[in-house]
């Protein structure tokens, strides 16, 4: 098989089991990664991840940290031994009266958006040891706006789509902002980066920022957005379930005076039956999807212009961008989704940034022989066939006619000549 530069792992932190399930959906080095290959692995991984989510959210003393899912989404961590409900920090809450009415209004809206994205953390008033009462979150928001030198209203628009940073301990932000400023040419570049990737400041440590650089983090954020789009159906189910559980917890605390731990346990017990039904529906849907993908693969070569969907190779730039010899690292059986649908939507500057992920000519990897010697790559063979710059320049509809790619034609020529 032909494998290029190692695909970038999403920037979010995943727990060990979820990380293994996520990696199970990624294309391996076999090259046979069409709809009948990587697609079924991706669907199966989503189903297993759903069951994992169910176990994490329903086990005693364990629940979701928030909702959002996808790449960089909320980690599923056990909360045993951590405070469930902490009083609001009076020191932070004291910042609110000193703020202007406009800033307080923006902070209140920021809290409501954060609460919608992280309903269980809002119900517990705690996010893994970080106080998360309304005044705490609002004060952290105002502190963030102040450190960025922005009016609260402008900071609200910057982080509106992802408020994860409001669950971050306030003492960590100065170090991270200092790291970003050391990488950027100007303060405006820092702000532009945060507008494009607001989650990065919460999910990436200062050390990781300095190691990766802004271009790498922008690329990771773009891949993360694509990954979240793919996993949207599962995320919507998890989000709705999380919001419902948070509402139950808040109602029990308010009406019955139950402790947060007791309310979480009661809510989990009530929802076990619901998750059993959802599990059956999910795997039924997965089975139907696998049948459809198998049919499309056998009849047309794949669901997208006669090619299969390979996760994540089809959407990773380093697989879709040809090297200096004109060879990409995407197997011929895979649809170049990035090249056909994502790249055309990008600006000239974004396209130029993505060229940094172009694979090196020497990065071809077709495995090793039994003795450990690296195996030479011959793209005229089935397992090593890859897209070329010539192929990628053609209209996608070209492949609806089952036209062979450049290296597929060369293989046919080789076979017709008797292998000489």
Image (spheres, rainbow, N blue to C red):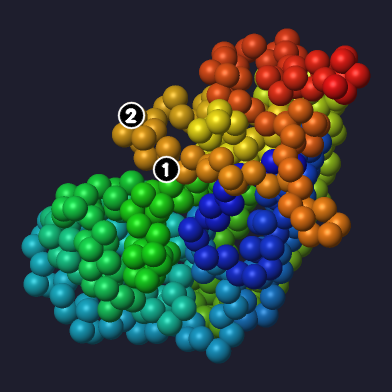
Camera-nearest residue between 123 and 142:
142
Which residue is the extreme one toward the front? Answer: 420
The percent position of residue 105, horizontal first and vertical second, equals 19, 57
Q: Which residue is mark 2?
A: 348
SS state under label 1: helix
At 36% from the left and 79% from the top, the residue drawn is 131
Residue 204 visible from this viewpoint: yes
The percent position of residue 322, horizontal first and vertical second, equals 54, 32
Residue 239 visible from this viewpoint: no
Q: Earlier in the sequence, mark 2 or mark 1?
A: 2
Camera-nearest residue between 287 and 2:
2
Camera-nearest residue between 341 and 313:
313
Horizontal side of residue 162 vs 47, given as left or right = left
Q: Which image quarter holds the N terminus?
A: top right
At 65% from the left and 63% from the top, the residue drawn is 18
Relative to residue 357, is residue 140 depicted above or below?
A: below
How packed mark 1 is, by other alpha carbons closer than 10 Å (few <14, some 14-19, many 20 or more), is some
Q: CA distance from mark 2 to mark 1?
A: 14 Å
State which quadrant residue 178 falls in: bottom left
Horizontal side of residue 402 vs 312, given as left or right = right
At 25% from the left and 47% from the top, the residue drawn is 192
Relative to residue 346, is residue 373 depicted above or below?
A: below
Which residue is the extreme one toward the right? Answer: 418
At 21% from the left and 84% from the top, the residue drawn is 91
Horizontal side of residue 281 vs 133, given as left or right = right
Q: Which residue is mark 1?
A: 356
């Amino acid at each position: 098989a032909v494998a290029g530069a190692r695909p970038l792992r999403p920037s979010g932190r995943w727990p060990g089991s979820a990380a293994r399930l996520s990696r199970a959906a990624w294309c391996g080095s076999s090259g046979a990664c069409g709809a009948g290959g990587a697609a079924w692995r991706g669907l199966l991984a989503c189903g297993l991840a759903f069951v994992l989510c169910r176990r994490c959210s329903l086990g005693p003393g364990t629940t979701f940290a928030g909702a959002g899912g996808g790449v960089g989404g909320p980690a599923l961590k056990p909360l045993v031994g951590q405070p469930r409900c902490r009083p609001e920090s009076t020191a932070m809450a004291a910042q609110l009266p000193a703020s202007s009415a406009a800033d307080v209004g923006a902070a209140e809206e920021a809290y409501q958006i954060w609460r919608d994205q992280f309903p269980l953390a809002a119900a517990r008033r705690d996010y893994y040891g970080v106080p998360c009462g309304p005044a705490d979150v609002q004060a952290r928001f105002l502190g963030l706006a102040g450190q960025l030198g922005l009016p609260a209203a402008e900071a609200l628009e910057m982080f509106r789509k992802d408020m994860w940073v409001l669950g971050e301990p306030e003492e960590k932000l100065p170090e991270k902002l200092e790291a970003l400023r050391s990488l950027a040419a100007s303060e405006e570049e820092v702000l532009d980066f945060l507008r494009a990737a607001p989650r990065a400041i919460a999910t990436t440590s200062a050390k990781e920022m300095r190691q990766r650089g802004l271009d790498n983090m922008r690329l990771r954020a773009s891949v993360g957005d694509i990954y979240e789009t793919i996993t949207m159906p599962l995320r919507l189910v998890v989000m709705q379930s999380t919001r419902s559980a948070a509402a139950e917890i808040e109602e029990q605390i308010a009406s019955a005076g139950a402790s947060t731990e007791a309310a979480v346990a009661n809510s989990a017990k009530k929802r076990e039956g619901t998750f059993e039904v959802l599990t059956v529906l999910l795997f039924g849907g997965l089975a139907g999807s696998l049948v459809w993908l198998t049919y499309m693969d056998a009849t047309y070569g794949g669901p997208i212009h006669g090619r299969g969907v390979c996760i994540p190779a089809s959407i990773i730039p380093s697989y879709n961008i040809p090297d200096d010899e004109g060879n990409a690292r995407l197997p011929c059986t895979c649809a170049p989704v990035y090249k056909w649908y994502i790249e055309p939507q990008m600006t000239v500057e974004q396209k130029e940034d993505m060229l940094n992920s172009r694979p090196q000519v020497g990065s071809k990897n077709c495995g090793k022989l039994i003795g450990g010697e690296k195996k030479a790559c011959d793209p005229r063979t089935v397992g090593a066939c890859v897209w070329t710059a010539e192929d990628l320049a053609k209209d996608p509809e070209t492949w609806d006619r089952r036209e062979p790619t450049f290296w597929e034609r060369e293989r046919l020529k080789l076979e017709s000549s008797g292998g000489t």
